[in-house]
Image (cartoon, grey):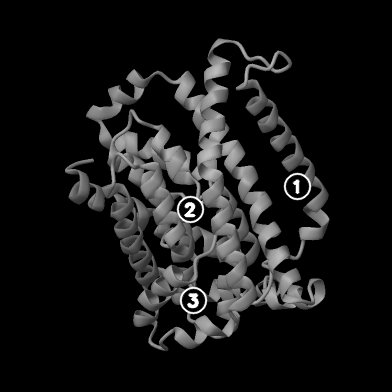
Amino acid sequence: MSAPLDSPSRSAASPRRSSVGIVLWAAFLAITVSQFHSPLFALPGRLQAWGSLWVAICVQALPFLVLGVLVSASIATFVPASFLGRMTPRNPFWAVPAAGAAGVALPGCECSSVPVAASLMRRGVSPAAALSFLLASPSLNPVVIVSTAVAFYGLPQMAWARFAAAVVAVLCAGWLWLIVGDNSTLAEHDERLGEYAPSKHCAANAVTRGEVFRDAALADFFPAASYLVVGAALAAAVKVIVPAQWFLGLADTPWLLIAVMVVLAIVLSLCSEADAFVAASFTAVSPTAQLAFLVVGPMVDFKLIAMQLGAFGRGFVLRFVPAVLLSAIASACVVGVVFFGGL
């Protein structure tokens, strides 16, 4: 973690990603201007309600996204990659909770967790421990918990429920990997793991710590901010288009409501520092369904699956993603019953 966590293909994909990001932010700025009743961008009826909610979600979430990026970039700059390896016990069983605790102390976003986990495996850390850190860093870090407390100011126990459910999910997924994991699929991708080693790209792309910090912050911020803009827009659309009665009608089938929120978490692919504000906007769903959204999102979503496919291969993803998804949903349901009295 001593360098920016660039993927090897970043330079090739950068122009396309930059263009998409520019279009997204231009649309967001246009909608923001419309909220001040500008005649140039005036929106009619329900579009105005959608624009207001979209802007509100983004404005609330953006400070925490920036804070999370700055913390992650600071760790990438000043904490050597060997630090976590020295902290992790050699016994794989105890290495899982140790790596989970390291995720609290060394917070990061989902986008950086995959290359960091790949780097740890290359340095001899057990796969179960490295994968536990991959899950814990974006799920258990203090910025995420604080943002959840702010987003759910009317339901203060949600922040504690999220932390507890994430802890259980990380431990269950890590220990489950010790049982069902096939580390041979990882061994087949040793060459790819090398491509994801951050130190290699640090040496090529940055000289000073200031450059390392800048590159790491920019590499994390723009993709995460783009996902926030898209996710907030979709969440606002669901809020405006889907009647609240539809969600209330699912109250008699809480498992279906939880499944809907889990699918939304996977599809929206939000940054964990910002997802609480989107979850809080779904006021018609149960707290446990909101909790499932918050626990699943940082552990399983489309962008993470794509990154894991590139870093670890298809065989790994086919085993790891179901194990994590099962652990996350089960822990959210159990903790939801404990904290909120039901599903």
Q: Secondary structure at mark 3?
A: helix
Q: Work out whether residue 268 can be spotted.
A: yes
To which residue does mark 2 refer? 300
In this rendering, the label closer to the viewer, 2 or 1: 1
Report the Cα–Cα distance between label 3 and label 2.
18 Å
To which residue does mark 1 refer? 17
Quadrant assignment, res 30 = top right
Q: Label for residue 127?
A: 3
Graded by Cα atoms within 10 Å as few (under 14), some (14 to 19) or many (20 or more), the crowding at tag 3 reads many
Which mark sits nearer the N-terminus, 3 or 1?
1
The amino acid type, in three-letter code, at marker 2 is Val
Task: Say which residue appears at 53% left-offset and 41% top-offset.
Answer: 268
Graded by Cα atoms within 10 Å as few (under 14), some (14 to 19) or many (20 or more), the crowding at tag 2 reads many
Count of numbered tags: 3
Q: Are the residues tagged 2 and 1 within 8 Å (C-beta)?
A: no
Report the Cα–Cα distance between label 3 and label 1.
31 Å
The amino acid type, in three-letter code, at marker 3 is Pro
Q: Nearer the viewer, residue 171 or 66?
A: 66
Quadrant assignment, res 231 = top right
Quadrant (top left/top right/bottom left/bottom right) for the C terminus: top left
